[in-house]
Image (spheres, helix red, strand yellow):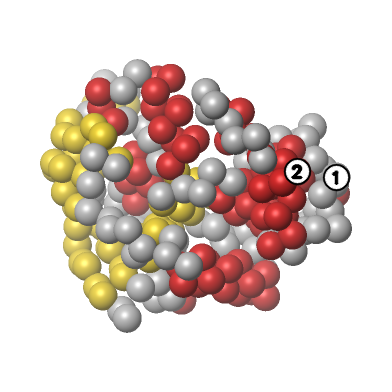
Amino acid sequence: MLDGVSRVYNMGGQSLRALDRFSFEFRRGEYWSIMGSSGSGKSTLLNILGCIDRPTEGRYLVRGEDTGRLDDDALSELRSRHLGFIFQSYNLIAQLDVLENITVPLLYQDDPPKDGWERAKHLAERVGLGSRLHHRPRELSGGQQQRVAIARALINDPAMILADEATGNLDSKTAEEILALFDELHGEGKTIVIVTHEPDVGERAQHLLRLKDGCIEEVRHQR
């Protein structure tokens, strides 16, 4: 839950308010798309939801815990246990193979699960990479790299999956396959929030949140 959240950046001696007293709650099991023009605040919102950035003002609660009161180590622990982030540019580690990349979030946990490798293998197979377990990112197509990123986001069984333009770098066929996987995950009860500039991707979600100048412009319940 976000309660009166603002995010202000200081740029060249001037203040830029990317989010402005933003209050909203993404409930468990919902599937939201976030849309808006460039500079509307959608990426800032996603970064705060993912505990990659912190609010300048207001509170962001994850599972009832105020993230603003956590130090960096505690925030990393929370992020690694309860949040899964999927980046447009994949953000895979070039020196690691598929299985190793998938397990990266577990490295940030104080007490990682003992079945981490088994989980990673199962997820790799689920996203269609069972025959590519020991390939490195340079040996994979863009769509395959995005599948690794999705499996990595799922390794900690997160409360919320956050995706930033997850289909932006993919061809239409591969994008449809990735969106079908999101549909499947939502059908299993996962909470999904995806930032997109593509109308067809935005309309695919259960709900749509449109931003303008760091504020809510529209909330649409699509199905």
Disc 2 residue type (three-letter): Leu
How many numbered marks are there?
A: 2
Residue at 39% in and 59% down = 191
In depth, the one of 37 and 7 nearer the eye is 7
Which residue has dot 1 on it? 134
Q: Is residue 108 left or right of residue 81?
A: right
Seen from this angle, which residue lies furthest front?
114
Q: Position of residue 138 (x, y in %)?
A: 82, 45
Q: Secondary structure at mark 1?
A: loop
Instruction: Bin the neighbour count of mark 2 within 10 Å (Cα to Cα): few under 14, some 14-19, many 20 and up.
Output: many
Q: CA distance from mark 2 to mark 1?
A: 7 Å
Which residue has dot 2 on it? 99
Q: Position of residue 168 (x, y in %)?
A: 56, 60
Q: Quadrant of the C terminus?
A: bottom left
In depth, the one of 9 and 75 nearer the eye is 75
Q: Is residue 198 left or right of residue 167?
A: left
Q: Position of residue 62 (x, y in %)?
A: 30, 41
Disc 1 residue type (three-letter): His
Pointers 2 and 1 in contact (C-beta within 8 Å)? yes
